Image (cartoon, rainbow, N blue to C red):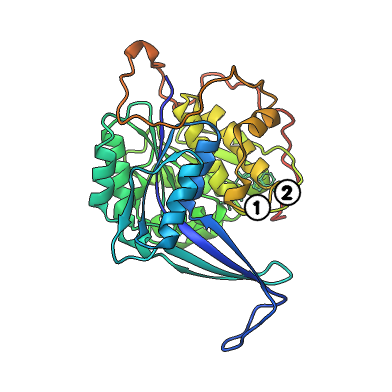
Amino acid sequence: MSGRVIVVGSVNVDLVVRAARLPSIGETVTGGTFERHHGGKGGNQSVAAARLGRPTLFVGAVGDDAFGAEARQALAAEHVDVSRLVTIPEAATGVAVILVDAQGENMIGVASGANADLVPEMVAEAIGRLGPLDGDVVLACHEIPTGTVAEALRVGRAAGATTVLNPAPAAGLDAGTVVLADVLTPNRSELTLLAGTILGDAAAHEAADDPVGVAKRLLVALPATDGHAIVVTLGALGARIVRREGVVEVPAPSVAAIDSTGAGDAFNGALAAAIAERRSLEDACRRAVAAGALATTQAGAREGMPGASAFRAFLGEPDPEPRAPAVAVPDSRAATSSEQEPRSPIAPEPELRSPIPEPDPGPDPEA
Ligand code: ADP
């Protein structure tokens, strides 16, 4: 039986002004156009998992304001269970104010608001009420307090879930939090920052040229990480699964990328969804890489998250028999032992399956 994805993280409203150029200090630039988008890594990753058909819950916080009500409604409209989305009185919903010029350069100011008020007790309570989490995945990102991330991973793990940490942003994360993740999913710059924090400056410098080697050293340096994996995402080059015992390359399919915003969120949501489907980490990464690639072919972050049918078409998989949409997420499930696959989904695959169709590393944007 497949499990649920429980995302613990941030939700924001993005206010975007596009103008011919960015203002300098004290200046007003007029003539812009305004857009509003739903964002926040936690919110986006929830939508990524839910669009792929996985029962998904979001644990986070909004303020008691109009943006909060809209953010909740937007997640619910994507079939994300928002019953654990807390409304914090007196707090403002997280807002990102984004200025973009004609060349696509931007300036961003973030007011975390309620995201910063999501304390560990709220998350422990929200996850605790879900009952046993065997077969489920807890996916956390770091746009909420570090102690809350650690608590989410700790409580999730204690209840039997597989834990995934997207260390974004990586600043402020410590080794004690990182070791609570069965799977850690840094991109190249997040790996560099983590390596600097945990291994020192020399490792941070090496991460640019040798992300896989540095990821391996990170894993070896952290206590109690036997069986854990670091999945480093490398943009158009795809991802690398790094375990103590070896490395698996997962190339990205070649796509006509137009907007890489949200690629990492698509990757993480799809990865968690696939692990919750009891797929091996290799298989889950192949799917996550495909979802990330597909997201780059659409404009926008949350808007660009692939839907299940486009995703299956991209993978060359047939549509399943029609069934009721996954809307309701029960608090606890009575999965019988006969429904469980015996192997841990994050254990190395005994034999590699064939890669997703037409794997092609494509051009290296960093070359
Ligand atoms: P982030 O968005 O967090 O910076 P990455 O840039 O590493 O993370 O992208 C995450 C994933 O999205 C990659 O592992 C890859 O699967 C996919 N991806 C990103 N950019 C491209 C691209 N230009 N072509 C194909 N896939 C891409």
| Residue 92: x %, y % from top left | 37, 66
Judge left or right: residue 233 versus residue 298: left
Q: Is mark 1 within 8 Å of ligand 1?
A: yes
Q: Is residue 169 visible?
A: no
Q: What residue type is labelled 1?
A: Ser
Judge left or right: residue 239 versus residue 117: right
| Residue 132: x %, y % from top left | 27, 29
Q: Mark 2 points at which residue?
A: 257
> Could you classify mark 1 by the number of other residues whose Cα lies within 10 Å: few (under 14), some (14-19), or many (20 or more)?
many
Q: Residue 252's mark?
A: none
At a point 56% along the width and 43% down the height, the residue shown is 266
Whether 15 is drawn above or below 271: the answer is below
Q: Is mark 2 within 8 Å of ligand 1?
A: yes
Q: Residue furthest top?
A: 338
| Residue 285: x %, y % from top left | 56, 34
Q: Can residue 124 be seen in this view?
A: yes
Closer to the camera in the image, 197 or 147: 147
Q: What residue type is labelled 2?
A: Ala
Judge left or right: residue 85 versus residue 128: right
Quadrant for the N terminus, please.
top left
Closer to the camera in the image, 202 or 126: 126
Q: Name the residue under label 1.
A: 260
Closer to the camera in the image, 15 or 358: 15
Judge left or right: residue 10 versus residue 294: left
